[in-house]
Amino acid sequence: MQFGSILKAVGVIIGVLAAFLLIPAVYSFFAGTDDFPAFLIAIGVSSVVAALLFMVPKSKSSLKTGDSYALVTFGWLSASLFGSIPYYVSGYIPSFTDSFFESVSGFTTTGASVLTNIEALPPAVLLWRSLTQWMGGMGIIVFALAIIPYLNIGGMGIFQAEVPGPTAEKLTPRIQDTAKILWIVYLIFTVILIGLLWLAGMSLFDAVNHSLTTMSTGGFSTNNSSIAGFHSPVIEWIITAFMILAGINFALHYHFMFRGFNYRVYSQDSELRFYFIIIVLSLVAICTSILIKQGGDFLDVLRNAGFTIASILTTTGFGTADYEFWPVFGQFILLLLMLMGGCAGSTSGGIKAVRFMLVIKYMYVEMLKLIHPNLIRTVKIKDAVVDREVLANILSFIFVYTAVMIFSILLVSIETNDMVTALGSVVACLSNIGPGFGTVGPTDNYAHLGDFTKWVLSLDMVMGRLEILTVLILFLPQTWKK
């Protein structure tokens, strides 16, 4: 294990965090709010620790796979720890457990909150909550990769360990340039959304915050009642569209925006077609069940169902309707969408659409082989044959994901007597969604849960964001052997 290089890189990550902390600190200074000292302390502590770690001598060898996983995990835990300082020191979240939970929820873009009165927070704290999600959406370590290559410790392994999906697409020969491209596309979409929400009637402050948390599929809001608090169908449709865009592989956005605006970039992608098929089928099924069992105005049902499906599938977690009052059929569909998530290479959580698609194709091929034992048939994606090793890895991932989910539910059930809440909170945190079912539903929060449960769910959020294996591999003795 190359501890020198790992600690040096973690120092860079904490330094990046300190730089971002300057944004709410400056805002707080000019606003004259009482949280300014908390941000100064957070910047000071982060800067000192970052400087000390950066002075650690670099390891002689480049990072191996296990080293990259350790760096990514320690980097995210460090960001969550130092990101919690403003909450704790300011006193707005007086419990360290709750402060850490809120910070982890931000950086992992989960959106699960312990705050019971969000509107009572000063603007700078609200801005910091949104910034943590925006940093975590594309990845604070991917952002830091623009600096880390200069340390000469390797980058592709780190990139693969953090970017969600079965494989990480390298857009350029240099991983540093790939990181820059992804962040540029991310920034462009965020700026466009800020303008649209502002024109639609949001204040500039609200537009900035909700753009940061929409493109990151995070779901933190400046309102207690989330997007429903704006009472604007136009705003809801705009955010619905951008949640769906954020759930698409950002490599496709790059190819479209910087290589001739060719729509075939999207139309020829099989995962994206599957993603939209799921959205349409879910929308038809849920709208039909609501209209048959509960009635209502068709356009209102369509808007609320469309917004909720986009929010849950992309693991954003915004709310305009309490889906726990929907028919059970619709709630069960939402539970399946929670598990699936958006596309690989997006800011969404969950298992990812491409994995679901490939498993369905694999099951179809295996059933055909039962009927025709001599049949030669392969699983393909984008006209390329999917290697059986990739399929085996996907099946292994889904098994591990399910095992971690079941084990976490058992742990959460120690303090939680409600089975629906235990299931809903674990699925919501492991898939980085935020709102779940039971007492952590779309109109509730996580404040009432016990400290032990919050630590379990915090770990679930990190594992979900880093796709589980990145964290679990650190528990293997072989990882730490030379």
Image (cartoon, grey):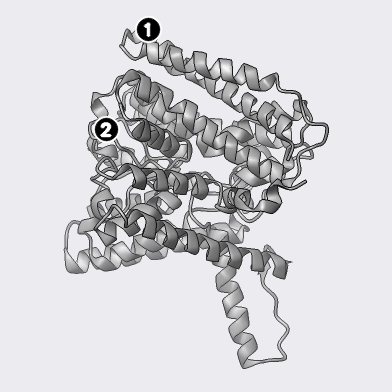
Q: Secondary structure at mark 1?
A: helix
Residue found at x 57% / y 15%: 48
Q: Quadrant of the N terminus?
A: top right
- 341, 280: nearer the viewer: 341
Residue 293 visible, this orientation:
yes
When asked about the image quadrant of residue 458, the answer is top left
Side (left or right) of 416 relative to 407? left
Query: Number of callouts in the render?
Result: 2
- Is 91 above or below relative to 315? above
Residue found at x 44% / y 14%: 41
Give the spatial CA distance, label 2 vs label 1. 22 Å
When asked about the image quadrant of residue 67, the answer is top right
Q: Which residue is mark 2?
A: 223
Residue found at x 60% / y 61%: 270
Q: Earlier in the sequence, mark 2 or mark 1?
A: 1
Q: Position of residue 262 (x, y in %)?
A: 64, 47
Q: Position of residue 196 (x, y in %)?
A: 40, 31
Q: Position of residue 402 (x, y in %)?
A: 48, 63
Please name the amino acid that badge 1 sits on. Phe
Please name the amino acid that badge 2 sits on. Asn
- 157, 176: nearer the viewer: 157
Residue 255 visible, this orientation:
no
Residue 117's label in the rendered image is none
Q: Secondary structure at mark 2?
A: loop
- 90, 137: nearer the viewer: 90
Q: Position of residue 435 (x, y in %)?
A: 32, 48
Q: Which residue is mark 1?
A: 30
